[in-house]
Image: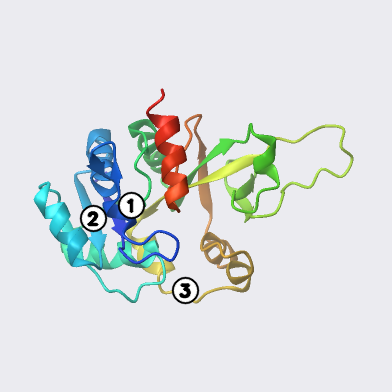
Amino acid sequence: MKNIIIIPARYASTRFPGKPLADIGGMTMIQRVYEQAVKSGVAEKVLVATDDMRIFSHVKDFLGEVVMTSAEHKSGTDRCFEALEKTGEKYDVVINLQGDEPFVQPEQLHKLTESFSDSSCKIATLIKKIKNEDDIENPNVVKLVKDINNYALYFSRSTIPFNRENENIPTYFKHLGLYAYRAETLKEITSLQPSSLEIAESLEQLRWLENGYKIKVAETELESIAIDTPLDLKRAEALYFSR
């Protein structure tokens, strides 16, 4: 398969303006994400998709590949599709690696793309068993339940499954925000209108489920540390650089 990793990165952020250019141990966040993507070796091309000239210029400075995209996109998925179209090239699988995942591991990207060895797989994502009990009821931690064939049944900010009897404790899974799509599937899902479940939970992937798309889930033991606020950054640095 011919794969491309696209890294959507915007400058504007309510909670952390300029996040992609934040310094992490002497290197910007976006450069760390880019270099981890390249290191994985899972794609023929790694491309940053941004709507800001500061990010564009910075990626050029470290000799990365970058493309300017519209500032009107509502999601990273939409930005990925525009960037894909602008390459003018044909790819089988598009990996959507968010620009706030500086600690993504190459093994996670390998695990994600392995799902497409199954020709019926159209969309794939990653999950991890929840070991911290506080995460189970934390609405900022997205939970997922899956079927016996490792396809997602539902994603929620609520605790799922609900343990009514409190005897046999179920396995709880955390959803990691890494996605990969068949190129033709990416085109299809970006044309869908927002759905009621998506709006209720503020989870874009529910739009795809509501419209009948199946999402393959692969399990990883590696944590994903997304950075949403300056405090997140300090905590992540303390955790990562203490290893």
Q: Is residue 205 left or right of residue 201?
A: left
| Whether residue 121 can be seen here | no
Residue at x-position 43% and y-position 32%:
238
> Do callouts 1 and 2 mark residues in contact (Cβ within 8 Å)?
yes
Residue at x-position 57% and y-position 73%:
195
> Do callouts 2 and 3 mark residues in contact (Cβ within 8 Å)?
no
Give coordinates of residue 64: x percent, y percent. Answer: 14, 49
- State the residue in front, 30 or 49: 30
Mark 1 or mark 3: name the one nearer the start of the chain. 1
Name the residue that disc number 1 marks. 99
In the drawing, what numbered circle is on residue 192?
A: 3
Q: Residues within 10 Å of mark 1 (few under 14, many from 20)?
A: many
Residue at x-position 55% and y-position 62%:
203
| Whether residue 125 can be seen here | yes
Measure the alpha-carbon separation of dots 1 and 3.
Answer: 24 Å
Amino acid at pointer 1: Gly
At mark 1, the secondary structure is loop
- State the residue in front, 229 or 149: 229
The residue sitting at the right extreme is 165
Measure the alpha-carbon separation of dots 2 and 3.
Answer: 24 Å
* Of labels 2 and 3, the one closer to you: 2
Name the residue that disc number 2 marks. 48
Residue at x-position 24% and y-position 54%:
91
Mark 2 or mark 3: name the one nearer the start of the chain. 2
Measure the alpha-carbon separation of dots 1 and 2.
Answer: 8 Å
The quarter of the picture where residue 81 lies is bottom left
